[in-house]
Image (cartoon, grey):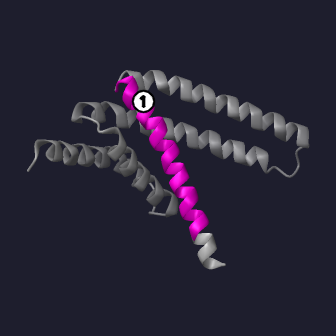
Amino acid sequence: MNENVKKGWWVFIMCLALALPSFAQKSPGRSEHIESIKVAFITSKLDLTAEEAQKFWPIYNNYNKEFLVLLKKKREARYNKNSDPNETITADLVYESKMLELKKKYRKLYAKAIPPEKILALYRAESEFREHLYRQLKSRRKQTE
C-alpha cells in the first residue's frame, strides 16, 4: 500500500477516534450524522499529518462546541417573541461580534497545531461543506414538491 494512503487512513482513524466521544453523549440524530460527515470532509481537505491531527482535532472540537452554544443563544434571542425588534437586532449584532471574537481566538490556537496554509484550507473546507449542505437541502426540497 502506498505510504500516503497509509498515512491518510491513519489520520482518518485518529480524527474519528478524537471526534467520537463528542457523539457518544446522545443517541445519534441528524445533527450528529451531519457533524460526522463534516469531520470526514474536513479531514479529506486538510491532509493533516498524524501529529497535526492529534493537536488540531481537540482544538477544533472545542471551537465547535463554543460556536454551537453561541449559535443556539443567538437563535433563542432572535426568536424571542416578547422582545422589542430593536433589542432583537442589537442582540443579533452582539452574538455576531462574539462569534467573530471566537473565530479570532481559535485562529491563534489553530496556529499552534497546523500551518497557516491548512488554517486557510480549514476555512475553505467549512465554507464548501456549508454550500454542499445547502445544495443538498435545496435538492431535497425540490424532490418533495
Residue at the limit of the structure toward the left, as seen here = 1
Number of marks present in the image shown: 1
Between 22 and 45, the one nearer to me in the picture: 45
Quarter assignment of residue 143 = bottom right
Between 82 and 50, the one nearer to me in the picture: 50
Q: Which residue is mark 1?
A: 119
**Residues in magenta?**
114-139
- Residue drawn at x 58%, y 64% as measured from the top left: 137
For label 1, the crowd category at 10 Å Cα-Cα, with few meaning under 14, some 14 to 19 and many 20 or more, is some
Left or right: where does residue 37 sit relative to residue 73?
left
Left or right: where does residue 109 sit relative to residue 13?
right
Left or right: where does residue 76 sit relative to residue 49?
right
| Residue 85 image position (x, y, % from top left) | 90, 43
Amino acid tagged 1: Ile
| Residue 39 image position (x, y, % from top left) | 39, 48
Quarter assignment of residue 77 = top right
Image height of 59 relative to 104, above or below: below
Magenta span: predominant SS is helix
| Residue 50 image position (x, y, % from top left) | 22, 36
Please check the rendered image and state whether residue 137 is part of the magenta-colored stretch, yes or no.
yes
- Residue drawn at x 24%, y 43% as measured from the top left: 11
- Residue drawn at x 47%, y 57% as measured from the top left: 34
- Secondary element at image label 1: helix
The C terminus - image quarter = bottom right
Image height of 75 relative to 95, above or below: below
Please check the rendered image and state whether residue 127 is part of the magenta-colored stretch, yes or no.
yes
Between 56 and 125, the one nearer to me in the picture: 125
Image height of 84 relative to 102, above or below: below
Left or right: where does residue 14 sit relative to residue 41?
left
